[in-house]
Image: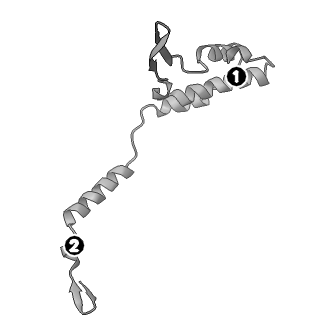
Amino acid sequence: MIKVNNQRIILSAFINYASVKHQTASNHKLTQPKLDLLQPLRQWLDNVEIPNQKLAKLIAKYIPAQCPFERDIMLFGRKIGHIPPMCKLNPLYEQFVGLRFRALCYLVDQCGEDIQSYC
C-alpha cells in the first residue's frame, strides 16, 4: 500500500499477477538463443581462401554478379508482370557474395588480371 494525501492506494488492485508472469515468461523466451543449423556452413564459406587463379576464375564465373531470377514478363511488347530478385531469400547469400568478392580481389591483386568480363 502507498499512502498519498491521506488516501491509501492498494497496488494489488491495479496489478494483474497472471499477466506479469506471462510477460516475464515471454521476455525469457525472446532472450533464448536460436538454433542456427547453417552457422557451420556460413563459417566455412567465410573462411574459404582462394589459393590459385583457376579456383578464383571458377568462383567468379559461377557466382553471378546480380540476381539471375529477376525478370520482367513481357507480352506483345508490354510489361505484364515482374519477378522480383529472390537471391535475398537464400540464407547463404551474404557468404556467396563475399566469396565472389574475395575471388575477384585475388584475381586483381595477385594475378593482375582485368575482371571487367566478370562484372
- Number of numbered tags placed on the structure image: 2
Q: Which residue is mark 1?
A: 104
Residue 101 horizontal/vertical position (percent): 66, 26
Q: Dot 1, how many residues are within 10 Å of its Cα: few (below 14), some (14-19), or many (20+)? A: many
Asked if residue 108 is positioned above or below residue 78 in the image, the reply reads: below
Q: Dot 2: what SS?
A: loop
Residue shown at the point (28%, 56%) measured from the top left: 25
Residue shown at the point (24%, 93%) measured from the top left: 6
> Which amino acid type is marked by label 2?
Phe
Specify the quadrant of the image occupied by residue 23.
Answer: bottom left
> Which amino acid type is marked by label 1?
Leu
Q: Which residue is mark 2?
A: 14
Per the model, the C-alpha gap separating discs 1 and 2 is 64 Å
Q: Residue furthest right?
A: 112
Is residue 86 visible in the rendered structure shown here? yes
Specify the quadrant of the image occupied by residue 54.
Answer: top right
